Image (spheres, rainbow, N blue to C red):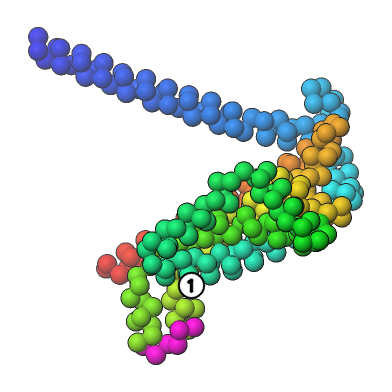
């Protein structure tokens, strides 16, 4: 009797595990559908011959052709890439230097500065955009490319700092001192010891800055000039009237490019990890 009861209980327990697994898979599927279904609908509409978003009339590449002949969109895309590249590079340099400076501060001062660093991230973009616009107007600076780049640097630097600081904390302080003892000058020790140790944080900070800069709308809206519209601002002005199929085509291209970059990065990380494992295996032998 006891054996029968235990067997039944284990079967029930196993059935409960199976139900939980099925439920979790359904939940994950629903989440992915909720996240990516709109994107796939957008991509499908970019190939729709009709301008309608609800009626499919045929397959075409015309909207992609018209996109590459739309000077307004192409100019805005170029502006966006230039601003994002310049702002991200400058932000990475300033943020890395600031992170090193913060790391070498006293504990109380370091905690205070880190909390101040969080303010631009936690602050509303609306407040940041309006305050920067008022600052430029007060200084009698015409809104344009330079104000746009400066504004993007302002909100990108904290992301670099917060990506580099953890890598500095993980680094062994004695490595730098050992390099000095072995004959390196401070610059050589920094370049050959510190930079390689914190490089993952620098790269991730740069990529975050680049992504946020390309994607930013609110701060750019308040700090751009008439000749320096970025892509989000142009798309917003176009969608105020009606969503153009050219915007669908552009969005599809951006999604595919981002997806390709993510795949390349993941494959690179997998290859690097497997190479490290093989190297460890060879050393063990």
Q: Quadrant of the C terminus?
A: bottom left
Q: Residue furthest front?
A: 138
How many neighbours does mark 1 have within 10 angstroms: few (below 14), some (14-19), or many (20 or more)?
some
Q: Residue furthest left?
A: 2
18 part of magenta stretch? no
Q: Looking at the image, can residue 183 be seen?
A: yes
Estimate the x, y position of residue 225 in percent, counting from the top left.
83, 54
Q: Quadrant of the N terminus?
A: top left
Q: Is residue 244 left or right of residue 190?
A: right
Q: Is residue 238 left or right of residue 265?
A: right
Estimate the x, y position of residue 175 in percent, counting from the top left.
36, 76
Q: Residue at x 64, y 30 (%)?
A: 37
Using the image, determine if residue 134 lies above or below residue 250: below
Task: Give the image quarter of residue 246.
Answer: top right
Q: Looking at the image, can residue 269 be seen?
A: no
Q: Residue at x 81, y 35 (%)?
A: 239
Estimate the x, y position of residue 210 in percent, counting from the top left.
64, 56
Q: 229 and 141: which one is in front? A: 141
Looking at the rendered structure, the secondary structure element under dot 1 is helix
Q: Main secondary structure of the magenta part?
A: loop
Number of labels in the image equals 1
Using the image, determine if residue 11 lies above or below residue 177: above
Q: 104 and 41: which one is in front? A: 104
Q: Residue furthest bottom?
A: 183
Q: Which residue is mark 1?
A: 195
Which contiguous range is marked in magenta?
182-187
Q: Is residue 96 left or right of residue 112?
A: right
Estimate the x, y position of residue 140 in percent, counting from the top left.
81, 61
Q: Residue at x 33, y 65 (%)?
A: 280
């Amino acid at each position: 009797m006891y054996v029968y009861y235990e067997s039944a209980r284990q079967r029930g327990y196993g059935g409960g595990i199976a139900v939980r697994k099925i439920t979790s898979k359904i939940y994950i599927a629903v989440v992915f559908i909720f996240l990516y279904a709109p994107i796939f609908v957008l991509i499908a509409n970019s190939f729709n011959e009709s301008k309608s978003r609800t009626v499919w009339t045929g397959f075409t590449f015309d909207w992609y052709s018209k996109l590459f002949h739309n000077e307004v969109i192409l100019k805005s895309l170029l502006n966006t890439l230039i601003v994002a590249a310049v702002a991200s590079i400058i932000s990475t340099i300033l943020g890395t230097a600031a992170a090193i400076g913060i790391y070498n501060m006293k504990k109380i001062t370091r905690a205070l500065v880190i909390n101040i660093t969080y303010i631009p991230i936690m602050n509303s973009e609306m407040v940041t955009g309006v305050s920067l616009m008022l600052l430029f107007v007060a200084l009698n600076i015409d809104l344009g490319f330079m104000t746009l780049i400066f504004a993007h640097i302002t909100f990108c630097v904290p992301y670099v700092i917060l990506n580099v600081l953890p890598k500095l904390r993980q680094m062994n302080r004695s490595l730098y001192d050992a390099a000095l003892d072995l004959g390196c000058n401070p610059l050589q020790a920094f370049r050959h010891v510190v930079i390689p140790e914190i490089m993952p944080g620098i790269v991730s900070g740069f990529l975050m800055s680049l992504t946020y800069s390309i994607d930013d709308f609110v701060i750019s809206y308040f700090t751009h000039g008439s000749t320096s519209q970025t892509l989000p601002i142009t798309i917003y002005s176009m969608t105020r009237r009606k969503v153009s199929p050219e915007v669908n085509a552009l969005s599809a291209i951006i999604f595919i490019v981002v997806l390709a970059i993510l795949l390349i990065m993941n494959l690179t990380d997998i290859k690097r990890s497997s190479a490290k494992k093989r190297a460890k295996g060879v050393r063990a032998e």
